[in-house]
Amino acid sequence: MAVLAVLQAMAHQSVAQDAGTGLEEVIVTAQKRTESINSVPMSITAISGDQLQAMGVSDMSQLAKTVPGFAYADSSYGTPIYFIRGIGFFDTSLASKPTVGVYVDEVPLAFPALTLGAVFDLERVEVLKGPQGTLFGQNATGGAINYIAAKPTDTFNAGFDAGAGNFGSYDVGGFISGPLTDTLRARVAVKHSQSDGWQKSSTRPGDTLGAKDFTQARMILDWRPLDALTLSLNINGFIDKSQTQAPQFVQTFQQTPGAFLDPRLPTYPRASSDARQADWGYHSEYDLDRDNKLWQSTLRADYEITDLVTLTSLTSYSDFDQEFGQDGDGTALTIADLYIVGQVESFTQELRVAGTIDKGNWVVGVNYSRDKAFEQDDQRLSESSSGHAFSRLGLPPTEVVPQVGRTTFESAAVFANASYELVPNLNLQLGARYTDTDIDFEGCSLNAGNQTFARGFSTSLGYTGVIPLGECVTFSTDTPPVPQMVVDSKSESNVSWRTGLDWNVTADTLLYANVSRGFKAGGYPTLPGTNAPQYAPVDQEKITAYEIGVKSTLFARTLQVNGAIFYNDYTDKQLKGRTIVPVFGPLEALVNIPKSKVQGAELQLDWAPVAGLRLTSGVTYLDTEVTEGSPGGNYTVFGGSVRTDLKGQAFPYASKWQISADGEYSFGLNSALDGFVGVGANYRSGTNGDFLPDPRLDIDAYTLVDVRLGVASADEKWRATLYGRNITDEYYWFTANRRTDSVIRYAGMPRTYGINFSYRY
């Protein structure tokens, strides 16, 4: 408090700034009402669409440039993994529910795979940190990311964007917006991104991979047939024909002890410090190009019952299809090569009433969702140790093991949230949501036709029957075991809540303290299960979070300081562990960790000291630890066969330090032209890809530096930018994992550079 008093005194004594300096007020809708970001009593980062574009943030994986505490990992199965403040869930299944909920205009994207086109034609993005459930329709333990699409305008507007860079990359897009009638407005936006392959084969000179071919579009119609009624229809989607990225081969790890190990693997070219170097295999049955499609439609209706009360309805339907090949082992050998097919249908309906009273705000509502996901992963492993697991029986190698999973989540919830001024400048925040979820699952591994896997495993278990082509080869726990589809269901309910106090110390300083509870739904895995216990579901995880924070605007609104300290008490954290399976050794399975914690601190600064200069920075410190493991152990040591207690271990993919900074200076060149120059940097300390640290899965610390410079018209109609990203050509990787007999990593992009041009009419 003493420090704040000194800073406030200095601010009041500061000399008034010249016109054009100072920070603009940021308006957000994090609490489902329009308000200044500085009046929201929670940790939130908001970035405008123009800022994202200037900093080169074109997809969610790059949000770490602007959002302290955010991290990304590649699951290697097409399912992106997002972390906020160390909280995330590393799972490869398409039907994996996220710990970080992602929304577009408050509509949830049910699964992470649907989020790949979210960074498109935006007004801004809002990132809420900590458990979310009282206001947003998808419970999440890590946080929520809400993308706000640019809306139709009252007057005619249009824009054009184009860019080109190395690796043959180019982007082209634009929008048209304006009124169609006195009551109807529209906005249409499109964008196409393309590039050549940036990865190089280590064994086949001239072969490349990683080409991009991504197209997206959106149409929004806003109709106001009555003064009190507004209807908004949003139809959007994307088509992704890009190539998948190959991992880098780090070293050999024999999954099935005592079985055949391909003699070429121990001497195979290993990952170097060249991010472009990798390798992959080809199969005539499939290639490494994606054929992914999403379309989504949302209808929003807002009806003003009175001047102080508004009824809102949000109805959304999403349809997503994916089909692609993925090399999973980083070699040209057939060790863990995948062909993945999936489909998602998602329906959500929310109905809420919000209003204001003399001393506060309130909202009550109901929410329903039904999310269906199907996934089939064909894993080719004929040159792996697992593929030769039955060689002792005189059987040839297993060619392919298909695995299927079909999951349905049906959820209903009722929620309420309120803010009330107890005494002048002191407000009480209360919120709660009751959620009831039913989960239905069926899944197994299939007999692909060569009978090796079916005959081998059934013989090992004493099963003498014949498993027909296309039928399940996953065995029950009966005596004797029988092959069958695993069919199961699970019902869960929870009450997420939030309570807090916020105090406006001065007109420019807010102190807040919150306690909240959040949940992430349980679920089932899609994996190559040989016996039914591998498909056992995990229970819902629970976090109780404590946060104290401050938001202060200083020095005549030229400096914004936001800080927070937090402690998260974690129960039943979900993770993909391993279980010992006869013949094969350690194979994947989902498990819960009884107790763990996440604690840390965060600081964000936004400073505009002189006209034309804008500096931003963010620092996050994390300390994560498993505080209670299962009595009999709940994890299998990487490469071992003994179950191990995780007590005392840190979380994977949870760097202790994340630091980001960005600065831009703009200046007049003449009466018609302005110049600008900017630089950004992002640092992450080292972490590991597993709960039990292993040097083979280390993720080293790295620092990435971006630069930009260019010219713009003084009337802001056009802007030309030269950019360089990762200009030091830092070699880094964001994922470290094991796939059958390979230890692999996914490298980040090397140095890229190019030019962008924007025009606004």
Image (cartoon, rainbow, N blue to C red):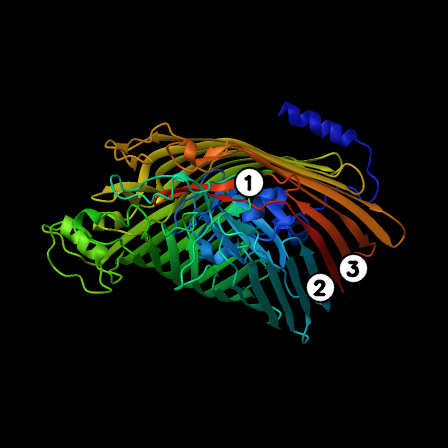
The picture quadrant where one finds residue 570 is top left
For residue 582, say whether it is visible.
yes
Mark positioned earlier in the residue sequence (2 or 3): 2
User: Up-down: is 68 above or below 133?
Assistant: above
Which residue has dot 2 on it? 160
Which amino acid type is marked by label 2? Phe
Considering every residue shown, the one lying at the far bottom of the view is 181
Q: Which one is in front in this view, the residue at disc 3 or the one at disc 1?
A: 3
Q: Is mark 3 on a helix, strand or loop?
A: loop
For residue 551, say whether it is visible.
no
Q: Where is residue 149 in the image (x, y as percent from the top left)?
A: 60, 59
Q: Which one is in front in this view, the residue at disc 1 or the one at disc 2?
A: 2
In depth, the one of 369 and 82 nearer the eye is 82
Measure how far apart labels 1 and 2 are at the Cα level: 34 Å
User: Up-down: is 520 above or below 647?
Assistant: below
705 left or right of 557 in image:
left
Q: Which quadrant is home to the N terminus?
A: top right
Which amino acid type is marked by label 1? Ser
Which residue has dot 1 on it? 43
Which residue has dot 3 on it? 717
